[in-house]
Image (cartoon, grey):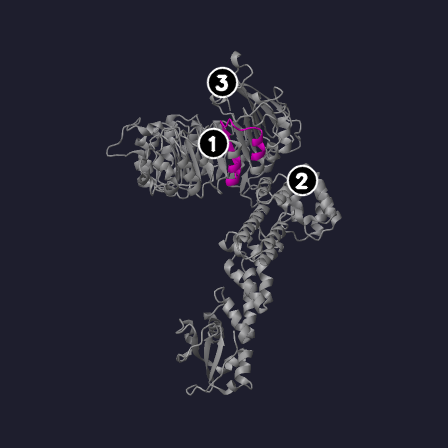
Amino acid sequence: MSSAGDGEDGGGAAADTVVLEITDAAASPSSAPPPPPIPVSALAAPLPSPTVLAVRADRSRLIESSSYFRALLGGSFSESGSGYVRISCDLAAAVQVLRYLFEPPASFAISHHNFLPLLEGALFLAVESLLVDCERWFRTVRSRNPSMVVPLDFIIEAWYFAPKHGVTFVEDVCPGYLAQNFVQVISSRSFVHIPYDLLCSTIESPNLTVDSEKQLCEAILSWVSASRQSCEQSVSNSADNQLSLLSKVRVCLLPLGFAAGTKRNCFEFGNNAVCMILNLLKDSLQTLLHTVTDDNLDSYRIRLTEYSKKIVLSGCPQLTTQFLYISALPTDLDAVFKRTIVSDVNDGCLNHYNGLVKKAKTLSFRNFEDLQCLLLRCPWINEINLSIDTSIILSKYSIISSRSEVRRDVNRNLSSYYMQSGLYGTSGNPVFSNISKLILEGRNDITDMNLLEISMLKSSLCYINIKHCTLLTDDGISTLLLNCRKMHSMVLSYTSFGNHSIQTLCSLDPSDSFSYHKDEHAHVMAFRLQELHLEGCEGISCAAMSQLVSNMNIVKSLCLRETSLADGALCNFVGSSLEYLDISETVVSMVSLAPVIRRNSNLSCLKTAGCRNLLFEQGEVQSTSGNKYGRFLQEITSTCYLEDVEMGWAFCPVRVDDLIPSFSKVRRMTVGLGTTLPENILHALPEICPFLESLVLRFQVISDRVVRNLLESSTNLQVLCLHYCLGNLTSFSFQTMAPALRILRLQWVTPWITNDDLTILTQNCNLVELLLSGCKLLDTSSQEIISSGWPNLACLQLEECGQITLDGVDSILDCKALEEVLLRHTGRGIGRTIITDAIRELPLLRKLALDLCDASEGGYDTPNVPEGKMMRSVRMSRCKKSAAAARSCFGEASSSSSNRKPVQHRETIVLEWSSRQLTTTVVEERL
C-alpha cells in the first residue's frame, strides 16, 4: 500500500460524505479521467475498472472506524475539509475494508477468500476493529471444527504474508492447525510447497495427529524429495533440512519393513532405525526403563492426541503393551512412578493402577474412563480381526502322517485367542455388545463349541469370516446361522459349510421383520445376504446349491469358486445387485451366465478362470425360449465396466476396440489357461486399461516389446506376474524405470537373468516381493545384490536358481523385513540351523519353505518352540532319487545344465505352529 494523494473538492458532494478515488498501487499511471463515483452499496458487484475506483462514503463513519481516515479527514491535512480525496493502495484490499465498514454484518462475513485482502487493508487503513475481527476469525478456524475447513494453499499464503506485515497471530495458529489436520494436509497436492519453517513447527506441535509414525515419515520423505527437485534451496540447505526433519521421526515406532526400505535412499537414517527396532525386539522392557530413568519417553510415545481417530501399529512387532501405557501416561508424572508402571505392566500386574488414577485425573484420551479401558474395555469397538495365515494343507492333499505336540512355552493361565464363555455371561456385556464384524480367518483350531460361544453376539453380529477354519462342521456353522439371524455377510470358504447350513439359510425366520414383504423369499435369511463367499466348499450338493442361489436376491458379492455350481443352479439366480462375482473352476456355460451379466450392470469384478464350458454354445440345461446370448466377450463388453477380471476360456479378444471402453476402468487383470491374447492386445494394455495396477499372465506368448511397454506406459502398475509364458524375452525388457512396481514374479520365463540384470532391476524398481524360478545363471553374489538392492523385501522365493545358496544364506538374513522365504534347488550350502537362524534374525518371518536337497549337512534342525512371535509354518520338500541320479536333485544327468529337467518331489514335511501346539504333517504332494 502507499500513502494518500492530493485531494480536491467535489462540487456535488454532501457535507457528510466524501468521494474516495482509489487507485491500485500496482497499476501503471494513467491520464484517463476517473470513473463516476458509485455508492458503497455497489461494491459487492463487479468493479467498473480493475485499476481505479471512485466511491462515495460516509465521512463520519470513516473517521470513527479508521485511524488512517481520522488523521486524513479529521486532522490538519489539507484533505480534512475536502469532499474528494485520492489515495493509492491495493484496490482489492480497500474494497473489502469498505464493505466491512458499511455493509450490514449479516451480509458480510470473513472467509478464507477475503481474509488476506481484509487483513492487508486493515493494516494499511488502521481499522482496529477489523484487525480484531480478523484475528478472532483466524483463531477460531482451528478451534471450532476438528476437521480441515480452509485449504492448505490459503494457510501457506497466510504464512508467507505474516512476517512481511508483522502479523504474529498467524504464526501462532498455523502450525497447530496443520498439526491437528495433518492426515488431510499430507493428502493435498500443496503439501510439498509448505515452507520448511512451517513444516518444522507443525511436526513439533504437541497436537500433531497421524495414523502412524510411518505416515509422518513418508510425508517428510515426500517433502524432502520435492525439495531436492526444486531450485529454491541450495544443495547444502536441502541436506540440512532433510536431516533436521528426519530427526523428528520417532524411528522406534516405524514398521520394520518400512524402516528397512528407507535404506535405499537414506541409508544412515534407515540403518539406524532398523538397529533401534531390532534392539527393542531383543529387550524392549529394559530399553523403556532406561528411557524413563533418563526422562526421555517422548521418543517412544505413540502420537495420541484428542484429535486421533485411528492408530495403525501393523508391522511393528517391537511395540508392546508398555508402549501403549507410556503413550497414555500424563507427561507430568515423575520418573520413579513411570518406571513402576512400566514394570508392573510387564509383570501383568496393575497394583499401582489406583495410584495412577489418583495422580492423573486427565488422560490423553478424554473419552476413556481409565487406562484399563484403553487396553481391555473399549465398548465402542465394533470390529475384531483375529485372522492368521491360513494352513497350506487343504483337504485335497494326500496326508501320509500327522502328529501334534503341545508347545513348551504355552502359559496355561493365558486365555485362548477366541472369546471365552465367561465373557458372555449376559448378552448385554459392554465389552462385546457392539461387535458387528468378526474375522477368524485361518484359525484352524477353533471348534463348534467356540462358535456356540460366539453366538452370544447375536444381537449385533452382521459379518463373520471363518475361512479355512477346518475343524468346524456343517452342523456347527448351521447352529451359528440359526442363532445370529442378523448376519448379512459371510466368508465361509474352505470350511465344511454344506447342505445343513443351506437349509438354515433358506428356512423361514419367525422373527423376520419382513413378515409383510410381497416377495416370498424375503422371509428367509438368504434373501438378506449381501456377501457370501463359499470358495472350496465341497460339501454342497447340486440341489442345495440351486436352492441357495434362488433365494439370494440382493447379494452384492458372491464367490462360488471351486463348488458344485452348474447351469441348473445359476439359471435360478435372479439378483440384479451384483458387484463381485467369482465362478472360477465351475462348469457353468453362457446359457446361465449371460442373463446374470445382463441383469447386473454394476458388476465391477468378474472371475471365470477355469470355466471351460463357456466355450460351448449349450450347457447342461436348455436355453429358455427367446433367451438369446452371444459370445462371452460380447456379453461382458456390452454390459459391464469392470475393474477386476480373471479370465481364461472363451476370453478371446482380437481387436483393441473389442475391449474399449468396457475395460477402461480395469485395475487388476489375470489372464490364464484357455486363451492366448494376441500381441496387439498385450501391447495395447496400457491404452486399454490406463489405471492398471496388477497384471498376471499365465501361459501367454510375450515379447520384449510387450513387457517393456507395460513397464514404461502403465504408470500405476504395482504387480507384474509372468508364469510359464512363452516368447523370446531378453534383458532389454526390464532395462527401464518402473517406480510404482512392488511385486515381480517371473516363473520359468527368464532363464537368462544374470547378476548384472539383477543389479539393473534393483536400480529401476523398489520391490517388496520377488519370485524367480529357472534362473540358472545366478550365483552366491546374487544374495548381496538382492539384499542391498531391496532391503525392504517382505517375500523372497527362489527356485531352481543356480548356486545362490552354495555358501549359505547370510545376505538373505540381512533382509530384516522378510515375512516369507522359499529356497528350493538354489545350491547345497544351507546350514543345519537355518530354521532357528531365520526365526532369530528375521523378526517378521511367518513362512519358510526349504528343500532337503539344499542342506549342506543332509537335513535341518526343527525347534519345538520358535523364538519369533510370527512364525507360522515351515515346509521341507524331499525329492525322488533314482540310481542314476542318487546324489542329484534332478532327473537324468545332462551334459548341459540348462537342459536339466524340473524335479519331481516325493513329499513335503510341514511344520505348523498354532497358539497351543506344533503340528508336523507329511504330505504326499509338493507344496
- Which residues are the magenta region? 758-786
Q: Earlier in the sequence, mark 3 or mark 1?
A: 1
Q: Position of residue 278 (x, y in %)?
A: 65, 38
Q: Secondary structure at mark 3?
A: loop
Label 3 crowd (10 A; few <14 / some 14-19 / many >=20): few
Q: Is residue 763 magenta?
A: yes
Residue under circle 3?
895
N-term mark: 2 or 1: 2
Gap between marks 2 and 1, in whole Å? 36 Å
Compute the Cα span from label 2 to label 3: 52 Å
Q: Is residue 530 above or below residue 830?
A: below
Residue 92 in the image: above or below residue 887? below
The amino acid marked with disc number 2 is Leu
Whether residue 890 is visible to the viewer of this picture, yes or no, is: yes
Residue depicted at 47% across the width and 31% down the height: 746
Can you tell which quarter of the image residue 593 is in?
top left
Residue 64's label in the rendered image is: none
Residue behind mark 2: 280
Viewer-proximal residue among 531 and 215: 215
Checking the image for residue 746, the label placed there is: 1
2 or 3: tag closer to the N-terminus: 2
Residue 693, percent across and down?
Answer: 44, 41
**Residue 132 lies in the magenta stretch:** no
Identify which residue is drawn at 26% across, 32% down.
Answer: 624
Q: Disc 2 or disc 3, which is closer to the eye?
A: 3
